[in-house]
Image: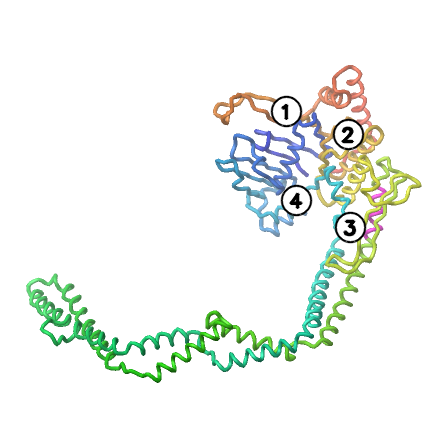
Amino acid sequence: MLIGLRIENFALIDRLELAFGAGLNVLTGETGAGKSIILDAIDAALGGKVTSRSIRTGSQRAVVEATFRLSSQVAEWLNQEEIDLLDDYAVVCSREMSTNQEGILRSSRSRINGVLVNRQQMEQLRSRLIEITAQGQTVQIGQTAIQREYLDSFGGVNLIEQRQKVSAAFQSCSGALAALENRRQSEQMRLQKLDLLEFQLRELSAAKLNDPDELESLEQERSRLAHVVELQKQSYQVYQALYQNDADAQAAADILGEAEATLIDMVIYDSSLQPILDMVSAALAQVAEAGRQINTYGESLEADPERLESVEQRIRQLKQICRKYGPTLPEAIAYQQGVEAELQELKGGGQSLETLEKIYQEKKVILQECCQTLTELRLTAARKLEERLIEQLKPLAMEKVKFQVEITRISPTANGADKIIFLFSPNPGEPLHPLTETASGGEMSRFLLAFKTCFSMGLVGTLIFDEIDVGVSGRVAAAIAQKLHQISHYQQVLCVTHQPLVAAMADRHFRVDKQVIDTPKGEKNGQATDFRTVVRVSYLDSHSTRSQELAQLAGGDSATEAIAFAESLIAEADLKRKDKGSRYNL
């Protein structure tokens, strides 16, 4: 049950705190007064969609916080999610939103009892706390896919689990059919494909592609073989420069040797020069070693025209392979491996048509059996839903209504082999037709109220109805009011209404209106005006204030006749409460 709501800088609300109670809580006010903003704030606190427009103009941060009375079901879920209890009384759901300097939504964080949670966790908790119903949902409930979801949800855990089995069986069967069809379609081209792949494999195998770096190594070797004389000459030049110079000039090793000898003498008198001596000695050793190695390299060079020709031929062969199967040598090697695998499959490494056909038929039977079980569960759920919904509609001035869940067989899908259509006939003697083709606006309002009652009874602590009574009046409005009152014996009900008959039944009555206030210093937001529009909510806790509000709803003024009518509604509502006895303790 929702017991408290705190809002800061949300839409037109600057700051607001509301306390709700058990039973029927009603919000009234003129059209556009901001009643729906209150419901939007509750929705936002429980993970609903928000945008930058959700944050009050001139502010960069908004907070909504909804406090619910803790139930055993919610406490168990919190324990599973390892979220600590604040106490044994309440659970707090909050949402913080912020924008950047340009007014673009920057962050939106949800918390449960102060613990940061993800969207999935908040949705799971939401399903245990509230059910929000608006008249706009009549469009959705007319869709067959939505009707199937509602029926399956009504069927309970066993039906949902069976539908999951159907989904798994469908995926398995679809995979088997795809494998079978692919094999059938490829059979005619199999021999042509075999010839092509075998030719390619022969050519690739003859090239003996083993080393992905072979082409790079061969090109390096070719370059060396083609420049043997030049490399010999240059290596000898390097050797003379580093180690032993035939000319009068000193080699690098000679110069470093002289420097080392001088430093040795200097160190005798100043030991701080030892690091420099060490570096020169190391440089001398490296230069000497480099000289020896370049000399060995030069002596090893030898012209080999035959080897050069062989290397060039191999390079041409590999480049031709790369042009056809590459463009690089590693890619050509990978292509060869792919050809080998594909050939193995085409030559019988895969399953035969007969085997694939047998596998598909077996999985098809499993899918059909799963679908049949699901259909039976849906039929059982449909009969129960029909009975319960008709019982819920009777008190809403629809005593002769007929409702039927039509289930027809279709080809198996991931959701089963059933097409679900809600058929409805509000008038005696009229045949059943699809729901949206038959029901008027007022009838859809009553249908939606009864329908949501069937689904939410005992599952959540709070039912929220946003103008569920739009388009009705007189006896029908009175029936809706009575129904909401009956529901509120077992679950908290929060209702936005324009109907005085509904508002009169409220246990707690709130009036919502807009007010223009002076803008606090520094909150002009660059505008010329010093005023801002805000939403205010008043708790009508006296007989006179309620009478005034009901008179406004009934007649648009507070004339004597309207006041008298409002007082009669309140008196009649009080009598109905007394007739029902004490309220069920939520």
Q: Secondary structure at mark 1?
A: strand
- Percent x, y for residue 358? 75, 74
Q: Are marks 4 and 1 in contact (CB under 8 Å)?
A: no
Q: Nearer the viewer, mark 3 or mark 2?
A: 3
- Percent x, y for residue 301? 27, 81
Label 2 amino acid? Val
Q: Which residue is mark 1?
A: 514
Q: Secondary structure at mark 4?
A: helix
Mark with earlier residue (4, 2): 4
Mark with earlier residue (4, 3): 4
Q: Which residue is mark 4?
A: 126
Q: Quadrant of the N terminus?
A: top right
Seen at 69% across and 74% down, the residue is: 188
Mark with earlier residue (3, 1): 3
Characterize the magenta stretch by its predominant secondary structure: helix
Q: Which residue is mark 2?
A: 502
**Magenta span contains residue 383:** yes
Q: Nearer the viewer, mark 4 or mark 1?
A: 1
Q: Which residue is mark 3?
A: 151
| Side of 586 relative to 472 (left or right) | left
Mark with earlier residue (2, 1): 2
